[in-house]
Image (cartoon, helix red, strand yellow):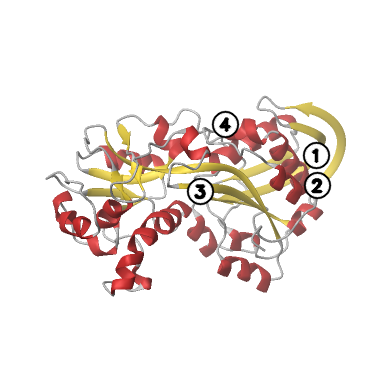
Protein backbone atom coordinates (compact mmCIF):
# COMPACT_ATOMS: atom_id res chain seq x y z
CA UNK A 1 0.00 0.00 0.00
CA UNK A 2 2.75 2.44 0.90
CA UNK A 3 5.01 2.30 -2.10
CA UNK A 4 8.06 4.16 -0.84
CA UNK A 5 8.02 2.93 2.73
CA UNK A 6 10.97 0.58 2.48
CA UNK A 7 11.02 -1.89 5.32
CA UNK A 8 14.28 -3.47 4.27
CA UNK A 9 15.32 -6.78 5.79
CA UNK A 10 18.14 -5.89 8.08
CA UNK A 11 20.33 -8.16 10.16
CA UNK A 12 18.45 -9.66 12.99
CA UNK A 13 20.71 -8.80 15.84
CA UNK A 14 18.70 -8.34 19.11
CA UNK A 15 16.67 -5.44 19.52
CA UNK A 16 14.65 -3.72 21.84
CA UNK A 17 14.23 -0.28 22.94
CA UNK A 18 12.40 2.50 21.29
CA UNK A 19 12.49 6.07 22.46
CA UNK A 20 15.10 7.61 24.65
CA UNK A 21 15.35 5.22 27.55
CA UNK A 22 16.75 2.70 25.10
CA UNK A 23 19.68 5.06 24.76
CA UNK A 24 19.73 5.48 28.53
CA UNK A 25 20.95 2.01 29.41
CA UNK A 26 24.19 0.17 29.72
CA UNK A 27 27.29 0.77 27.67
CA UNK A 28 27.67 -1.13 24.41
CA UNK A 29 31.03 -2.74 23.76
CA UNK A 30 31.16 -2.83 19.95
CA UNK A 31 33.67 -0.47 18.40
CA UNK A 32 33.88 0.29 14.69
CA UNK A 33 37.14 0.56 12.78
CA UNK A 34 37.80 2.96 9.93
CA UNK A 35 39.32 2.69 6.47
CA UNK A 36 39.20 5.69 4.14
CA UNK A 37 37.25 5.31 0.89
CA UNK A 38 34.87 7.84 -0.66
CA UNK A 39 31.63 6.56 -2.17
CA UNK A 40 28.23 7.98 -2.96
CA UNK A 41 24.66 6.95 -2.35
CA UNK A 42 21.75 7.04 -4.74
CA UNK A 43 19.75 9.27 -2.41
CA UNK A 44 22.26 12.01 -1.89
CA UNK A 45 24.43 10.97 1.06
CA UNK A 46 28.12 10.27 0.65
CA UNK A 47 30.31 7.96 2.68
CA UNK A 48 33.71 9.36 3.68
CA UNK A 49 34.93 6.07 5.07
CA UNK A 50 34.51 2.37 4.78
CA UNK A 51 33.77 1.10 8.28
CA UNK A 52 32.89 -2.07 10.09
CA UNK A 53 30.79 -2.72 13.15
CA UNK A 54 27.15 -2.96 14.17
CA UNK A 55 24.45 -0.39 14.84
CA UNK A 56 21.09 -0.91 16.51
CA UNK A 57 18.27 1.56 15.84
CA UNK A 58 14.75 1.48 17.24
CA UNK A 59 11.79 3.68 18.16
CA UNK A 60 9.11 5.48 16.18
CA UNK A 61 7.41 3.67 13.30
CA UNK A 62 6.90 7.10 11.72
CA UNK A 63 10.61 7.93 11.48
CA UNK A 64 11.61 4.34 10.75
CA UNK A 65 11.14 4.57 6.93
CA UNK A 66 13.62 7.45 6.68
CA UNK A 67 16.21 5.71 8.81
CA UNK A 68 15.65 2.42 6.99
CA UNK A 69 16.47 4.07 3.66
CA UNK A 70 19.65 5.55 5.14
CA UNK A 71 20.64 2.19 6.60
CA UNK A 72 19.98 0.38 3.33
CA UNK A 73 22.18 2.76 1.35
CA UNK A 74 24.88 2.88 4.00
CA UNK A 75 25.14 -0.91 4.23
CA UNK A 76 25.23 -1.05 0.43
CA UNK A 77 28.43 0.97 0.53
CA UNK A 78 29.84 -0.54 3.71
CA UNK A 79 29.52 -4.29 3.53
CA UNK A 80 31.13 -4.86 6.91
CA UNK A 81 28.49 -2.85 8.76
CA UNK A 82 25.39 -4.53 10.13
CA UNK A 83 22.41 -2.29 11.00
CA UNK A 84 19.22 -3.40 12.71
CA UNK A 85 16.23 -1.05 12.36
CA UNK A 86 12.78 -1.51 13.87
CA UNK A 87 9.85 0.66 14.89
CA UNK A 88 7.94 -0.70 17.88
CA UNK A 89 6.85 2.75 19.02
CA UNK A 90 8.10 5.05 21.71
CA UNK A 91 6.52 3.81 24.93
CA UNK A 92 6.96 0.15 24.12
CA UNK A 93 10.62 0.80 23.49
CA UNK A 94 11.05 2.45 26.86
CA UNK A 95 9.51 -0.57 28.53
CA UNK A 96 11.95 -2.92 26.79
CA UNK A 97 15.17 -1.40 27.97
CA UNK A 98 17.99 -3.92 28.13
CA UNK A 99 21.71 -3.91 28.60
CA UNK A 100 22.08 -4.19 24.82
CA UNK A 101 21.04 -0.57 24.28
CA UNK A 102 20.28 1.11 21.00
CA UNK A 103 22.72 3.46 19.36
CA UNK A 104 20.09 5.65 17.69
CA UNK A 105 16.46 6.22 18.62
CA UNK A 106 13.89 7.38 16.06
CA UNK A 107 11.34 9.71 17.66
CA UNK A 108 8.26 11.37 16.16
CA UNK A 109 8.18 14.16 18.73
CA UNK A 110 10.70 15.95 20.90
CA UNK A 111 11.42 13.91 24.00
CA UNK A 112 9.62 14.78 27.19
CA UNK A 113 11.27 16.37 30.20
CA UNK A 114 10.92 13.21 32.27
CA UNK A 115 12.55 11.16 29.50
CA UNK A 116 15.49 13.55 29.31
CA UNK A 117 15.77 13.41 33.10
CA UNK A 118 15.83 9.61 33.04
CA UNK A 119 18.82 9.79 30.72
CA UNK A 120 20.54 12.30 32.97
CA UNK A 121 19.89 10.11 36.01
CA UNK A 122 21.48 7.19 34.18
CA UNK A 123 24.50 9.26 33.21
CA UNK A 124 23.62 9.07 29.51
CA UNK A 125 24.09 11.98 27.11
CA UNK A 126 22.21 12.13 23.83
CA UNK A 127 22.45 14.34 20.75
CA UNK A 128 19.07 15.56 19.48
CA UNK A 129 18.91 15.87 15.68
CA UNK A 130 15.82 17.18 13.90
CA UNK A 131 15.59 15.40 10.54
CA UNK A 132 12.25 16.29 8.94
CA UNK A 133 8.64 17.38 9.32
CA UNK A 134 5.41 15.40 9.23
CA UNK A 135 1.78 16.36 9.44
CA UNK A 136 -0.74 14.27 11.33
CA UNK A 137 -3.51 13.48 8.88
CA UNK A 138 -7.01 12.88 10.19
CA UNK A 139 -8.38 10.22 7.89
CA UNK A 140 -11.82 8.92 6.98
CA UNK A 141 -13.14 6.79 4.12
CA UNK A 142 -13.38 8.51 0.74
CA UNK A 143 -17.16 8.46 1.11
CA UNK A 144 -17.03 10.93 4.02
CA UNK A 145 -18.54 14.20 2.78
CA UNK A 146 -17.87 16.53 5.70
CA UNK A 147 -16.20 19.71 4.47
CA UNK A 148 -13.98 20.16 7.48
CA UNK A 149 -13.29 19.02 11.03
CA UNK A 150 -12.26 21.50 13.70
CA UNK A 151 -10.23 20.74 16.81
CA UNK A 152 -13.53 21.03 18.71
CA UNK A 153 -15.09 18.38 16.47
CA UNK A 154 -12.14 16.06 17.00
CA UNK A 155 -12.31 16.56 20.75
CA UNK A 156 -16.02 15.72 20.72
CA UNK A 157 -15.41 12.57 18.68
CA UNK A 158 -12.12 11.31 20.13
CA UNK A 159 -11.50 13.13 23.42
CA UNK A 160 -12.07 11.83 26.95
CA UNK A 161 -15.73 12.88 27.11
CA UNK A 162 -16.60 10.86 24.02
CA UNK A 163 -16.01 7.46 25.58
CA UNK A 164 -18.98 5.25 24.76
CA UNK A 165 -20.04 7.24 21.67
CA UNK A 166 -20.74 4.69 18.96
CA UNK A 167 -22.44 6.97 16.42
CA UNK A 168 -21.13 10.24 15.03
CA UNK A 169 -24.33 11.93 16.19
CA UNK A 170 -23.56 10.98 19.80
CA UNK A 171 -20.87 13.67 19.70
CA UNK A 172 -23.15 16.36 18.27
CA UNK A 173 -24.21 18.01 21.53
CA UNK A 174 -20.66 18.21 22.87
CA UNK A 175 -19.31 19.60 19.60
CA UNK A 176 -22.05 22.23 19.55
CA UNK A 177 -21.28 23.16 23.16
CA UNK A 178 -17.66 23.69 22.09
CA UNK A 179 -18.77 26.12 19.39
CA UNK A 180 -18.87 23.85 16.36
CA UNK A 181 -21.48 24.22 13.64
CA UNK A 182 -20.58 20.90 11.99
CA UNK A 183 -23.49 18.51 11.45
CA UNK A 184 -22.26 14.98 12.02
CA UNK A 185 -23.61 12.10 9.91
CA UNK A 186 -25.90 9.45 11.38
CA UNK A 187 -23.54 6.50 11.05
CA UNK A 188 -21.38 4.26 13.18
CA UNK A 189 -18.32 5.91 14.70
CA UNK A 190 -15.44 3.45 14.34
CA UNK A 191 -12.09 4.83 15.45
CA UNK A 192 -8.79 3.15 14.59
CA UNK A 193 -5.64 5.03 15.60
CA UNK A 194 -2.18 4.76 17.15
CA UNK A 195 -1.92 3.41 20.68
CA UNK A 196 -0.40 5.08 23.70
CA UNK A 197 3.02 3.59 22.90
CA UNK A 198 3.24 5.81 19.82
CA UNK A 199 4.69 9.29 19.47
CA UNK A 200 1.93 9.87 16.92
CA UNK A 201 -0.60 9.35 19.72
CA UNK A 202 1.27 11.77 21.98
CA UNK A 203 1.45 14.40 19.24
CA UNK A 204 -2.27 14.19 18.49
CA UNK A 205 -3.16 14.53 22.16
CA UNK A 206 -0.82 17.47 22.63
CA UNK A 207 -1.60 19.35 19.42
CA UNK A 208 -5.35 18.71 19.16
CA UNK A 209 -7.02 17.35 22.28
CA UNK A 210 -5.16 19.43 24.84
CA UNK A 211 -5.72 22.56 22.78
CA UNK A 212 -9.43 21.94 22.33
CA UNK A 213 -9.93 20.64 25.87
CA UNK A 214 -8.34 23.55 27.69
CA UNK A 215 -11.70 25.31 28.07
CA UNK A 216 -13.24 22.10 29.45
CA UNK A 217 -10.56 21.99 32.14
CA UNK A 218 -11.13 25.64 33.01
CA UNK A 219 -14.89 25.06 33.28
CA UNK A 220 -14.39 22.10 35.60
CA UNK A 221 -15.99 19.63 33.19
CA UNK A 222 -12.81 17.54 33.26
CA UNK A 223 -9.46 17.65 35.02
CA UNK A 224 -6.13 18.25 33.35
CA UNK A 225 -5.25 14.61 33.97
CA UNK A 226 -8.28 13.59 31.89
CA UNK A 227 -6.92 15.26 28.75
CA UNK A 228 -6.17 12.32 26.51
CA UNK A 229 -7.94 10.24 23.90
CA UNK A 230 -10.90 8.06 24.77
CA UNK A 231 -9.80 4.55 25.72
CA UNK A 232 -12.46 2.63 23.82
CA UNK A 233 -11.06 2.63 20.31
CA UNK A 234 -9.09 0.15 18.24
CA UNK A 235 -5.41 0.91 18.77
CA UNK A 236 -2.54 -0.30 16.60
CA UNK A 237 1.18 0.50 16.30
CA UNK A 238 0.97 -0.29 12.57
CA UNK A 239 0.01 2.64 10.32
CA UNK A 240 -1.10 0.34 7.52
CA UNK A 241 -3.39 -1.52 9.92
CA UNK A 242 -4.87 1.82 11.01
CA UNK A 243 -5.61 2.77 7.41
CA UNK A 244 -7.21 -0.63 6.81
CA UNK A 245 -9.34 -0.22 9.94
CA UNK A 246 -10.54 3.24 8.96
CA UNK A 247 -11.48 2.21 5.43
CA UNK A 248 -13.30 -0.93 6.60
CA UNK A 249 -16.36 1.05 7.80
CA UNK A 250 -18.16 4.06 6.26
CA UNK A 251 -18.02 5.73 9.67
CA UNK A 252 -14.30 5.10 10.12
CA UNK A 253 -12.08 7.78 11.63
CA UNK A 254 -8.44 7.89 12.70
CA UNK A 255 -5.12 9.62 12.30
CA UNK A 256 -1.67 8.72 10.97
CA UNK A 257 1.34 10.56 9.63
CA UNK A 258 0.87 12.43 6.36
CA UNK A 259 3.42 10.34 4.47
CA UNK A 260 1.42 7.17 5.06
CA UNK A 261 -1.98 8.71 4.49
CA UNK A 262 -0.97 10.53 1.32
CA UNK A 263 -0.18 7.27 -0.48
CA UNK A 264 -2.97 5.14 0.95
CA UNK A 265 -5.91 4.07 -1.18
CA UNK A 266 -9.50 4.57 -0.12
CA UNK A 267 -8.92 7.29 2.47
CA UNK A 268 -9.76 10.97 2.56
CA UNK A 269 -7.35 13.34 4.27
CA UNK A 270 -9.73 15.62 6.10
CA UNK A 271 -9.31 19.41 5.97
CA UNK A 272 -8.75 20.74 9.50
CA UNK A 273 -9.45 24.05 11.21
CA UNK A 274 -7.96 24.96 14.56
CA UNK A 275 -11.06 26.89 15.63
CA UNK A 276 -14.74 26.26 14.80
CA UNK A 277 -15.55 28.35 11.73
CA UNK A 278 -11.86 28.94 11.05
CA UNK A 279 -10.03 28.39 7.79
CA UNK A 280 -9.97 24.74 6.77
CA UNK A 281 -6.53 23.61 5.65
CA UNK A 282 -5.81 20.38 3.80
CA UNK A 283 -2.61 18.55 4.69
CA UNK A 284 -0.14 18.85 1.81
CA UNK A 285 3.62 19.02 1.60
CA UNK A 286 3.35 22.78 1.19
CA UNK A 287 0.93 23.45 4.05
CA UNK A 288 2.91 21.26 6.41
CA UNK A 289 6.24 22.88 5.62
CA UNK A 290 4.87 26.43 5.84
CA UNK A 291 3.05 25.46 9.09
CA UNK A 292 -0.37 26.67 7.88
CA UNK A 293 -1.68 23.14 8.44
CA UNK A 294 -2.43 23.08 12.18
CA UNK A 295 -1.40 19.50 13.00
CA UNK A 296 2.29 19.22 12.16
CA UNK A 297 5.27 17.96 14.13
CA UNK A 298 9.04 17.68 13.84
CA UNK A 299 10.77 14.32 13.45
CA UNK A 300 13.98 13.47 15.29
CA UNK A 301 16.73 10.98 15.79
CA UNK A 302 18.53 10.82 19.13
CA UNK A 303 22.11 9.57 19.08
CA UNK A 304 23.83 8.17 22.14
CA UNK A 305 26.82 10.51 22.44
CA UNK A 306 29.18 8.07 24.14
CA UNK A 307 28.44 5.36 21.61
CA UNK A 308 29.09 7.78 18.75
CA UNK A 309 32.53 8.45 20.24
CA UNK A 310 33.28 4.73 20.71
CA UNK A 311 31.78 3.30 17.52
CA UNK A 312 33.30 4.63 14.31
CA UNK A 313 30.61 2.93 12.23
CA UNK A 314 27.92 4.83 14.14
CA UNK A 315 29.64 8.20 13.66
CA UNK A 316 30.06 7.51 9.95
CA UNK A 317 26.42 6.47 9.68
CA UNK A 318 25.16 9.72 11.20
CA UNK A 319 27.52 11.71 8.94
CA UNK A 320 26.03 9.85 5.99
CA UNK A 321 22.47 10.40 7.24
CA UNK A 322 22.89 14.18 7.50
CA UNK A 323 24.85 14.64 4.28
CA UNK A 324 21.98 13.17 2.29
CA UNK A 325 19.22 14.30 4.64
CA UNK A 326 16.94 16.10 2.19
CA UNK A 327 17.12 13.26 -0.32
CA UNK A 328 16.40 10.59 2.27
CA UNK A 329 13.48 12.50 3.79
CA UNK A 330 11.91 13.18 0.39
CA UNK A 331 12.46 9.57 -0.73
CA UNK A 332 10.49 8.44 2.31
CA UNK A 333 7.74 10.94 1.39
CA UNK A 334 8.22 13.25 4.35
CA UNK A 335 8.79 16.99 4.32
CA UNK A 336 12.43 18.13 4.42
CA UNK A 337 13.67 20.84 6.73
CA UNK A 338 13.76 24.28 5.13
CA UNK A 339 17.06 24.85 6.95
CA UNK A 340 19.12 22.02 8.45
CA UNK A 341 21.85 24.28 9.84
CA UNK A 342 20.85 23.73 13.47
CA UNK A 343 20.84 19.97 13.01
CA UNK A 344 24.20 19.98 11.26
CA UNK A 345 25.72 22.19 13.95
CA UNK A 346 24.42 20.03 16.79
CA UNK A 347 26.03 16.95 15.25
CA UNK A 348 29.29 18.66 14.25
CA UNK A 349 29.73 20.01 17.78
CA UNK A 350 28.34 16.82 19.38
CA UNK A 351 26.00 19.06 21.38
CA UNK A 352 24.30 17.02 24.09
CA UNK A 353 20.74 17.60 25.29
CA UNK A 354 17.64 19.04 23.70
CA UNK A 355 17.58 22.30 21.77
CA UNK A 356 15.29 23.62 24.48
CA UNK A 357 18.16 23.23 26.88
| Residue 34, horizontal then vertical, whole percent | 85, 41
Q: Are marks 2 and 4 in contact (CB under 8 Å)?
A: no
Q: Is residue 121 visible?
A: yes
* Disc 2 to disc 4, C-alpha distance: 27 Å
Q: What is the spatial separation of the Cα atoms under label 4 and label 3, in whole angstroms? A: 16 Å
Comes first in the chain, label 2 or label 4: 2
Q: How many labels sit on residues?
A: 4
Residue 165 percent location from the top left of the image: 18, 57
Is 314 on the left or on the right of 287, as rendered? right
Question: Would you call the spot at circle 2 few (<14 residues within 10 Å), some (14-19), or many (20 or more)?
Answer: many
In this figure, which residue is indicated by the disc labeled 3? Answer: 297
Distance Cα–Cα, label 1 vs label 4: 26 Å
58 or 352: nearer the viewer: 352
| Residues marked 1 and 2 touching at CB (< 8 Å) | yes
Disc number for residue 330:
4
Mark 4 surroundings: few (<14), some (14-19) or many (≥20) residues within 10 A:
some
Which label sits on residue 312?
A: 2
Q: Earlier in the sequence, mark 4 or mark 3?
A: 3
In the rendered image, which quarter is residue 339 located in?
Answer: top right
Amino acid sequence: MISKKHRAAFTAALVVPGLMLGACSAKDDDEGSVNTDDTETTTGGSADTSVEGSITISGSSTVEPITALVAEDFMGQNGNVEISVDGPGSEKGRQRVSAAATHVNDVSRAIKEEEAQACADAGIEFIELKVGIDGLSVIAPESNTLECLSFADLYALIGPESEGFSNWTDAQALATELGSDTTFPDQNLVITAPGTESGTFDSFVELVLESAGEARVESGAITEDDLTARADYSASPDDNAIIEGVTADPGGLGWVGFAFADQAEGVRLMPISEEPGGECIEPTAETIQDTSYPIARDLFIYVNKAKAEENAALAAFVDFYLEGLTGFVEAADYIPLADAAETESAWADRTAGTREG
